[in-house]
């Protein structure tokens, strides 16, 4: 059975399926219950599964993650929502010092199957702290897994897999793609959670992205095709672990790589990809790995975000620079 | 109960019923005090005299001489273990030790109040509570020797791993307690923390969460007067137990050097939790007789007179006086315990010295439960690097 639906709805359906399948699955966060979340991702879940399983929490992010850890220690599988990317930092301590490390600290005796959902990224004209992309701040921490779907189908299946994971997963939801629709096949056999996928084949250059930037890269590849350039687009899907084998395979074919993300370029995931791909593919590369992303400045006010965020022209500019080497 | 005048400072029960019964109305025991220090719940004076307490006597009413000797034994052995660990640090066998010296009554009293199916969330100083839970004391030493970051299975004794980041565990305890409620179980959780941790946001958040979800958790604060060099006055302007009032649950201050009072008050609080009456804050008023850890030098921030004043309130001494005065223990008991203490010291010493360094590859073990490609890759690189020394006769 397949159905075309928006990403927000796909996540909702995935949570519903998980709540239905496993009584240990809980959904918790600010406004996730009666309201259904500020983006309506959890719409209707409390009505169907009750206040004990879809939990409106006090407004305290550290408390949300900290109590989710306690619930996981008791055998539950909490899926917690951080309302916006910029609100996660009160919980950063619990995520980094406890959630990420308790499995190792216990020599493997304790498992913390907690999913932290974070709507992230810009492009929606929001006020400060509502448009950030903090994935690199989590990818640097061993013990966490970091994923970000780019489309409704992945959003559905990656949520299923994240909930089934015995490791904590930070699940970054590209909020500006919440309303983009795609076919979701509820009986599909999903690809492994941490494997990248080629979404467009090409021969001249690889564009690697995840989350909200995959669609942009597809648009860039279409535009480049009109100019006779064949770009391959790789949806990384997972930031930690990152599927370097897939990037390597693509780069060995195209010999050029541009990484695109909304997060600041400096110390961003693109830096890690550039370093590793340079090491793996040194003799294949015709140009240095280039990166397109945010600047080393606080995320700007909404009227400036179009200048800050990677867009079609900035991606194509990087493509041209790479091809010019 | 509303805010009382300064005349009635002692926390009091509500008029509704006996302690710990379901009939007890949810009232706060906290009272705002204009006085500097409120009274403590005390059942044994420093001189070892048993004093009556209408509210809490019931919780230790049936205690037998054997159980009293057991509490004494627990405290003596815990102190002996603690002294051995301090000595092992001085000998270079441990990298660090956080001594509980002076806090034995708070830990043994509260620890012995727990039921087997209760769950304990400790800081890094709850060696006495670990003892009560049946955690082998030698297991506590691995992290201080540097061979692991916590060497016991938390679920074997319902005793979580030590938490070093201050206050984090109070939220884990609250979440665990919320899970107990969801499961319909009647066990309870006890979360340990200190006066320093009382300033942490996580502790405040755990009070909020436990209150609004009516979670079965007891917050057991050992106010040992010092957070490394900072006195409790640097953390709070009101007696800590009174913090509970603002969150809507009872708070009570107990003499933390009185093992009987700690046992009674913690039993009361745990029974409240089990009965669905929600969280309780217990402030055990005690003193950290030693340094914060073996790396600390208390002479830089506090004087001897303070310590001497607290020595007179020693938790072990007062129970010994009571046992002797009431003829609940004879010389043979004390002599046997002395022998047992030395044997424990020897066992701990030998176990620590025999503790091997972990295998190099332990770095990568358990970073993830389901594995991680990068960890696999780096482990392989590490292995190759290590193997490169093989030709040079080992590493």
Image: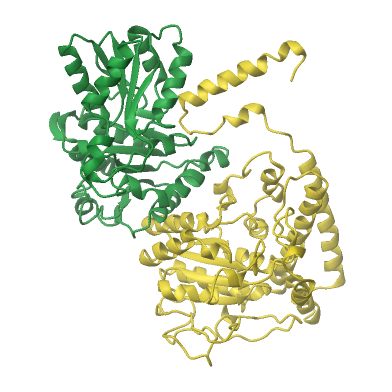
Chain colours: A green, B yellow
Q: Is residue A268 left or right of residue A229?
A: right
Q: Quadrant of the C terminus of chain B?
A: top right
| Residue A18 in sight from this viewpoint | yes
Give the answer, above or below, for where A306 lies relative to B125: above
> Residue placed at 34% from the left, 60% from the top?
A58
Q: Nearer the viewer, residue B170 or B115?
A: B170
- Classify residue A246 by image quadrant: top left
Residue name at image x 20 percent, y 55 percent: A35
Q: Give how far across and how far down residue A292 sits, in percent.
A: 32, 26
Q: Residue furthest bottom?
A: B7
Residue A243: x, y in percent?
39, 21
Number of numbered discs overlaid on the protein picture: 0
Q: Quadrant of residue B282?
A: bottom right
Residue A188 visible in the current orientation:
no
Residue A11 position, x and y percent, is 23, 39
Vertical relation: A237 (above or below) B24 = above
Residue at 74% from the left image edge and 80% from the top image edge? B46
**What is the quadrant of the N terminus of chain B in the image?**
bottom left
**In the image: residue B343, left or right of residue A11:** right
Q: Nearest the camera: A205 or B287? A: A205
């Amino acid at each position: 059975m397949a159905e075309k639906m928006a990403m927000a709805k796909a996540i909702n359906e995935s949570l519903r399926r998980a709540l239905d399948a496993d009584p240990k699955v809980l959904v918790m966060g600010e406004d996730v219950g009666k309201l259904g979340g500020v983006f309506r991702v959890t719409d209707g879940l409390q009505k169907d599964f009750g206040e004990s399983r879809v939990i409106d929490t006090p407004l305290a992010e550290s408390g949300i993650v900290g109590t989710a850890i306690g619930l996981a220690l008791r055998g539950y599988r909490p899926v917690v929502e951080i309302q916006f990317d910029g609100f996660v930092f009160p919980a950063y301590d619990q995520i980094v010092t406890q959630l990420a490390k308790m499995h190792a600290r216990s020599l493997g005796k304790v498992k913390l199957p907690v999913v932290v959902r974070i709507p992230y990224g810009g492009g929606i004209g929001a006020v400060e702290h509502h448009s950030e992309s903090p994935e690199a701040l989590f990818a640097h921490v061993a013990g966490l897994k970091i994923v970000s779907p780019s489309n409704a189908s992945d959003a559905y299946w990656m949520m299923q897999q994240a909930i089934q994971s015995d490791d904590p997963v930070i699940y970054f939801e590209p909020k500006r793609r919440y309303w983009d629709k795609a076919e979701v096949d509820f009986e599909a056999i999903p690809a492994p959670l941490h494997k990248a996928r080629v979404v467009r084949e090409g021969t001249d250059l690889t564009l690697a992205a995840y989350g909200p930037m995959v669609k942009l890269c597809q648009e860039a590849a279409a535009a480049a095709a009109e100019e006779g350039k064949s770009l391959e687009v790789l949806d990384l899907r997972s930031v930690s672990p990152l599927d370097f084998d897939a990037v390597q395979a693509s780069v060995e074919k195209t010999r050029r790589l541009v990484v695109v993300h909304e997060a600041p370029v400096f110390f961003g995931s693109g830096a890690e990809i550039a370093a590793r791909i340079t090491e793996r593919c040194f003799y294949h590369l015709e140009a240095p790995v280039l990166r397109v992303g945010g600047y080393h400045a606080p995320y700007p006010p909404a009227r400036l975000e179009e200048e800050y965020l990677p867009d079609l022209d900035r991606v194509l500019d990087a493509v041209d620079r790479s091809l010019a080497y | 109960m509303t805010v009382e005048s300064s005349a009635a400072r002692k926390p009091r029960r509500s008029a509704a019923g006996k302690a710990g019964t379901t009939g007890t109305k949810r009232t706060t025991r906290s009272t705002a005090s204009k006085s500097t220090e409120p009274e403590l719940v005390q059942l044994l004076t420093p001189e070892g005299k048993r004093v009556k307490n209408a509210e809490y006597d019931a919780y230790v009413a049936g205690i037998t001489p054997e159980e009293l000797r057991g509490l004494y034994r627990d405290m003596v052995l815990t102190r002996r273990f603690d002294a051995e660990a301090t000595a092992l640090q001085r000998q270079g066998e441990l990298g660090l030790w956080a001594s509980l010296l002076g806090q034995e009554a708070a830990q043994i009293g509260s620890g012995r109040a727990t039921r087997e199916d209760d769950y304990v969330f400790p800081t890094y100083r709850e060696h006495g509570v670990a003892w009560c839970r049946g955690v082998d004391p030698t297991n506590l030493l691995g992290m201080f020797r540097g061979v692991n970051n916590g060497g016991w299975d938390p679920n074997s004794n319902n005793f979580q791993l030590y938490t070093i980041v201050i206050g984090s565990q109070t939220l884990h305890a609250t979440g665990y307690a919320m899970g107990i409620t969801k499961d319909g179980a009647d066990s309870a959780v006890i979360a340990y923390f200190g006066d320093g941790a009382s300033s942490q946001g996580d502790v405040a958040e755990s009070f909020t969460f436990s209150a609004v979800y009516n979670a079965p958790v007891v917050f057991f604060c050992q106010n040992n007067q010092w957070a490394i060099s900072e006195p409790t006055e640097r953390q709070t302007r009101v007696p800590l137990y009174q913090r509970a009032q603002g969150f809507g649950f009872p708070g009570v201050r107990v003499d933390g050097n009185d093992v009987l009072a700690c046992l009674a008050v913690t039993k009361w609080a745990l029974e409240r939790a089990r009965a669905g009456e929600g969280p309780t804050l217990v402030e055990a008023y005690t003193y950290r007789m030693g340094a914060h850890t073996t790396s600390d030098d208390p002479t830089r921030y506090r004087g001897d007179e303070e310590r001497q004043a607290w020595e007179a309130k020693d938790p072990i001494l007062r129970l010994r006086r009571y046992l002797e005065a009431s003829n609940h223990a004879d010389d043979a008991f004390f002599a046997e315990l002395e022998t047992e203490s030395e044997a424990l010291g020897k066992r701990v010493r030998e176990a620590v010295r025999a503790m091997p360094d972990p295998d190099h590859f332990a770095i990568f073990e358990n970073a993830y439960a389901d594995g991680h490609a990068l960890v696999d890759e780096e482990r392989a690189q590490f292995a190759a690097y290590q193997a490169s020394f093989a030709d040079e006769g080992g590493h």
